[in-house]
Amino acid sequence: MITRFLLSNMDRRGLVFLALIAAIGLLVPLANLLMPAGSPLHVSTATMSLWGKYLCYALLAISLDLVWGYCGILSLGHGAFFALGGYAMGMYLMRQIGSRGVYGNPVLPDFMVFLNWQELPWYWYGFSSFPFAMLMVLLVPGLLAFVFGWFAFRSRVTGVYLSIITQALTYALLLAFFRNDMGFGGNNGLTDFKDLLGFNVQAQGTRAALFAMTCVMLISGFLIARGIVSSKLGKVVIAIRDAESRTRFLGYRVDRFKLFVFTVSACMAGVAGALYVPQVGIINPSEFAPANSIETVIWVAVGGRGSLVGAALGAVVVNWAKTMFTSGFMAPYWLFALGALFVFVTLFMPKGILGTAQGWWESRKRPAPVPAAEPAPAE
Amino acid sequence: MNAPTPGALTSSLLYLDGVSVSFDGFKAIRGLSLTIEPGEMRAIIGPNGAGKTTMMDIITGKTRPDEGTVMFGGSVDLTKLDEAAIANLGIGRKFQKPTVFDFHTIEDNILLALKSKRTVLKTLFWQTEGAQQKRIDEILGIVKLADKRERLAGSLSHGQKQWLEIGMLLAQDPKLLLVDEPAAGMTDGETAQTAVLLKEIAKDHSVIVVEHDMGFIRELGVKVTVLHEGSVLAEGPLDQVSANERVVEVYLGR
Amino acid sequence: MRILSSLLRMLALAMTLALMPAIASAQSTDDAFARLGADSFSDTARAIDILVQSAHPNAGVVIEALADGRLLAGGGAVVVKTKEGGFLDARTGQALTAQPAGVNPVRLNNNVRRVIQGALGGLGLINPDPGKRIAAAEAVFRARDVTVLPVLEAAIAKETDNRARLALRQAQAAILIAKTDAPPFDRIAAVDVLRERGDQDALATLRALPGDASPGLKEAQARAISEIEGRLALWRAGQNLWYGLSLGSVLLLAAIGLAITFGVMGVINMAHGEMVMLGAYTTFVVQELIRTHAPGLFDWSLAIAIPAAFIVAGAVGVAIERGVIRFLYGRPLETLLATWGISLILQQAVRTTFGPTNREVGAPAFMSGAFELGGLAITWNRLWIIVFAALVFAALLAILKLTPMGLQMRAVTQNRRMASAMGIRTGRIDALTFGLGSGVAGLAGVALSQIDNVSPNLGQSYIIDSFMVVVFGGVGNLWGTLISAMSLGVANKLLEPYAGAVLGKIALLVFIILFIQKRPRGLFALKGRAVEA
């Protein structure tokens, strides 16, 4: 009964989410392009880009929820996959600048000319092609996650150990990307983008299209994640989260299931990063900072881990609050608020906004026989 | 001591010979030898620390022995395989503390255990077929949980969890079942029912039951192996081993 | 009479003999002063040589003034402008009332400057203070001015102090080896002297051997260079080892508190770095108070800061444990998130109170300066930090192994329920253990305030490294933490010369990531069934 109730409830919730994102994806760009600037229905390009950023974060949160909420792998390095996707997109955008850079070099990006590089490093080859760059957006984070997970899951590194080495992973990448001779623009990263598929990235129309694309990708990501978690594989993954060695004794190769989910999740994070970069206009090594990855975790925790809608909601709510906070006189206190949020959510709302609301809803209907242990039940 | 007779290897389902393992200098198992025939049900008893659980860990691949032979079906070396591979060979295990998936429904618990291909892709695109659904229903009937199939396993009582776990073992359809203290924490009525259930299962499976409860062992009425300090102390029918002076000594501390 | 007359004759002869050099010298110094007024670089250089060789009483003053651009010449007059702004006649040293007309500063070029440097060295060579003589010899060694050679040789002949003689001989060797007309045998002997000296300067001097050298000399030079290079490489390795131990002790200090909270209690304290930071800020506050209220105690500031930092960080630790962590036992991932939140709050609190910029923490006298040990340069602050880390480690070990509290802590670690059943108040032990770990982090802060910037971000830069140390060493094992900190510190510093600081660090991170895959429980792991539970 409960499962069916949860599932149907979830389906309704999922449908509401999908409808909402689809509506936003359609209406916001239209309101931006068609409504005159004075109209109350007009959405400014800046606002649209800001919300586009939130939705990229929502996709990142869903990808993290897939591994943390469902598989119990607390990755403190998901920002690395996001940033790698972003860099892949950034490299495409850099190559599109062509000879319009400050130094006018038709092949080399400005920072390479500045550093006296004579030719394009081999790993920049191909990034002038959009399809190739998009492939890399998926492949680079996916491959890193696969290789990392292959070693980690096979040797059964779990729990906090895994969290700590994922953090070390993103930290190592942070240090590496800060180096000028890595060939990714060092400290300054990649910026001053001009064109995306021949359209000016600054132009209103391009921004609107990017926003719509973000919504499309968020919907796709949600559907894929939902498909995974509601399949039998999803049940296995939840079983691994709750009783890993029991699952193994049933004959499931736990490492392969973890590897699958981890890799899919990393690809999804990469796509989020790729959409983020043209809307924000820059990608730099600070995206690899361990603090960013941990912040992503708190979005998921706030929204409700083990719930894809919750994760997306958490990302938007926390980032919206951050914008509100940091743009006003309260700016110096944002870290107090964020820190308090971490403590509050872990102590008092372990199921996040959605889980808590749902528990409250159920307890009103009838006393729930759900055991009061561990994380929120699967949706 | 009770070394298996030559030739036992090929005819037996499970064959342990001279198995030893130690943790930080403590010898949990020393020179353990044991054979289980196809279709046999065996009870294993022994005081705390006799090595019962460690023996199960070795058979299921959780612990690697320092030395000794562990063969399954006469030809497969279990010491070379991991847990999943051993489970897929047909060795199922029920844990001492009932371990079910609390956040899955009872039906999903059985579905997860149901004998099927365990690969990532197969599970991702899984569709439960009619015969499989029938088998699930059947097992739910056997363990008397059919009316609770939609409930989360976490909401079950201790005894019901034990039964669910036995149901999961059935769904796995293993050649050999390792059952660790199935009657622990059960009422007398439940214990008796569990014994009946196990005897039913033993008709077409080999079973190893580890148990403390002598009454339960008596109800099973099978050959008993007594473990003590990591090796076999005595083997035979319950009446015979309980008359054995050394068994009485170690078991009752006299 | 005859006797008297012969006596008088002899006296006259003696007087003549005695006066002759003085006359000669007077003539040549006149020449020198004339050359100084000639406004030609080569004349100026020659004049300096003459002044040095004649040991003119004013030579030092004149050459110093020349070096500073205070020597004025023109129209036959040579005048020294004193540092105070007065004027002296360069020849007689008599004060003049005003600047004579028509004099201009004597100009210098690099060659003249080099000659001046050598000359000043040459003049110092006959200083009565052996320390000054050694310093002068070093100056000559670097200047390698051939004209100083006679003075140098005279000085060597007179020298009684062994160290000074060695320095003089080395200076002589440095000149000889470049002197193409010196006897070949002397030049090879000079190579030997330089080889024995064996430092970077000797190497540079040897490398500067002119191209005219004979095959024998060249061979000696090559051998000496390779020997010195080998020796220097050894010292460099020793120096890196020292830096590594120093870094290792810093890592140990930062990580050892974590080894207790993470290793013994299984609690992931992401705010650990902030405990270190609080310790550093406590040191800052203690120093400020001392500066304003009792400046005389400044050298004791660290000694006062040590207990203060322990108490402040320990108290905050206990508060965190009682306020947050105790509700999260058994949920390590949640603990990780909650303590991360606490770390953000603490950082912001410190930023709001003390400002976002670096705070200056002074070093007491015994912490500043450095000394040389063979080819090693050892700074006192690094040395004391190593000593401090060793003391903290020993104290912690003693607390855990010897005190009743340590016994109770270990009991709670191994079997919480059993310990509780035996009457141990586990809640209190948890709080104290956490307080101890945090307090030790505070101690680390005192040490780090001496070598790192005291800023709100101080803790952040150590947290990942600390976790790496604990995880690599094996959780629950203080000795493992020690070995891990030292080996990571040394490995880091030994990699640095080859890979650079950042790449070396990345390499180590990757190494640890791979290592954890191989041995998930670290270097010194507990084994057995208990671990799985």
Image (cartoon, rainbow, N blue to C red):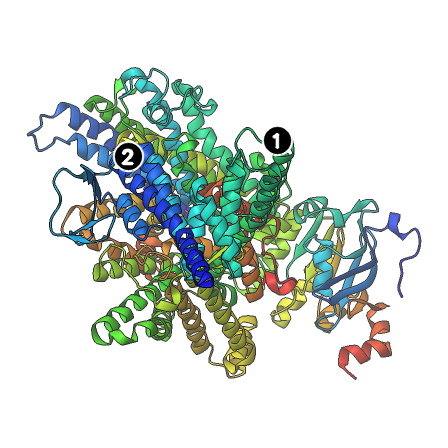
What's the chain of the residue with tag 1? Answer: C
- Residue linked to disc 1: C214
- Using residue B6 as the reference point, say whether residue A16 is left or right of it: left
C299 over C351 or under it: above or below: below
* C444 and B18: which is toward the camera: C444
Q: Position of residue B87 (x, y in %)?
A: 68, 48
**How packed is label 1: few (under 14 Cα within 10 Å), some, or many (20 or more)?**
few
Q: Secondary structure at mark 1?
A: loop
* C472 and B127: which is toward the camera: C472
Q: Is residue C151 visible?
A: yes
- Residue linked to disc 2: A21
* C98 and A45: which is toward the camera: C98
Q: Amino acid at mark 2?
A: Ile
Residue shown at the point (74%, 47%) measured from the top left: B80
Q: Secondary structure at mark 2?
A: helix
Marks 2/1: CA–CA distance: 87 Å
Check whether the beta carbons of the residues at disc 2 and disc 1 lie within 8 A of each other: no
